[in-house]
Amino acid sequence: MAVNFHNAMMAAKPALARNGLLALYYSGAHLLAPASLRGIGTIFMLHRVREPDATTFQPNRILEITPAYLEAVLHRVHETGMVCVSLDEAARRIEAGETSERFVVFTFDDGYKDNLDVAAPIFARYRVPFTVYLATDLPDGTAELWWVALERVIAAAANLRVQFPDGEIVFATSTVPEKYAAWHSIYWRLRGLGEQAFRAEIRRLSAEHSINMGALTRELAMSWADVRKLSNQPYANIEAHTASHVALAQMTPDEARADIARGIARHESELGRRPVHFSYPYGDPTSAGERDFEIVKEFEFRTATTTRKGFVRASHAQAMTRLPRLSLNGDYQDLRIFDVLMSGLPFALAKSIRPYSFD
């Protein structure tokens, strides 16, 4: 019963957070928030841009926004007087201590095909620079999009037998609510096992339910030909996201260094340039910590971004390998919510009351 209650609460979090953010909007409180809450700039984090999917079970929808919403955000950024810049220009402004003009940067993680096919034409039309942080094993075809594989396993199954260290658990997954409950339980319990262990179990589940993980990568990720085509476009830039997309914090220091170095080498080999910016896979505190920030410094990247929520501040000139980002999240594709988040008020409130996550 406790597990079911926890799963129900996890599933309800996006709706509760959305309602809370809309309440702030209608209260008008965000309009009174001091400018100091907003920092000097924002680095947006995205993954995919594509048309809405009619599928009812979409736990990974947080990683997707629609082309229409991306265009709406670009319009809003322009309306509010913020300037869209590249990562290079953002780094220059942070290092120089420039605070007179608030900037925004658009970044994508991983390297999905729709970054080229859907997102790139929109940015080109608006003449806005953007960066794709590429995990080089994806175009090599060897990386696992395990989160997509798990979604498809649950979507296709009427019930699921999952192996945990303390024994097997059978999940009913015949209805959409059951599928979401199973997702929330399986995802977080497996993540808690460590990356090697949970990946092994997802491989087993995928094989048992006829989900081809290699085919998933080929279906969704850019090939090297795609990456080269994107890198040749005037507003696009390709930067580093390790080779294998494994949480650095779960590697030994030598393993982490080797994975970063392998990603750099593949990048240079295929694109003819060394990446100068970096994004931590997953990027949360359990996936990238102080040790990993120091390791990344050894590679002399100009910047490195996390998924820790917040705005860039002048003080980040002393912390260029731990920059925060703000997710353009598929659960909150609403300009009213965008305006509230960009005011900085929810993050200021979160420091004291720790409300529901906005990512």
Image: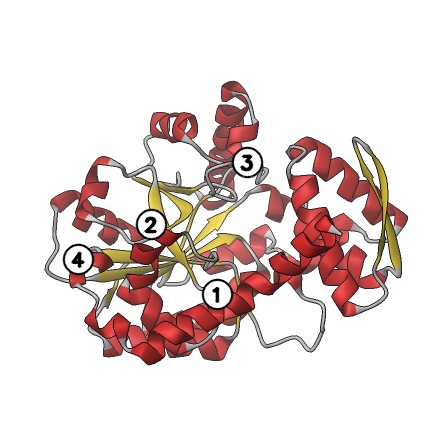
Q: Mark 3 belongs to which amino acid?
A: Ala
- Could you give the CA–CA distance between mark 4 and mark 2, rounded to whole angstroms? 15 Å
Q: Mark 4 belongs to which amino acid?
A: Ser
Residue placed at 27% from the left, 71% from the top?
Answer: 30
Residue placed at 64% from the left, 32% from the top?
Answer: 194
- Could you give the CA–CA distance between mark 3 and mark 2, rounded to whole angstroms? 26 Å
Q: Which mark is first along the chain, 2 or 1?
A: 1
Q: Is residue 244 above or below residue 30?
A: above
Give the residue pinned by disc 1. Answer: 17
Q: Mark 2 belongs to which amino acid?
A: Lys
Q: Badge 2: how crowded within 10 Å, few (<14), some, or many (20+)?
A: few
- Report if the CB atoms under discs 1 and 2 are less than 8 Å apart: no
Give the residue pinned by disc 2. Answer: 351
Residue 285 lies, in percent from the top left, at: 46, 38
Q: Mark 1 belongs to which amino acid?
A: Ala
- Could you give the CA–CA distance between mark 3 and mark 1, rounded to whole angstroms? 27 Å
Give the residue pinned by disc 3. Answer: 247
Q: Is residue 213 above or below residue 193?
A: below
- Could you give the CA–CA distance between mark 4 and mark 3, rounded to whole angstroms? 33 Å
Count numbered badges in the picture: 4
Quarter holding residue 294: top left
Q: Which mark is first along the chain, 3 or 4?
A: 4
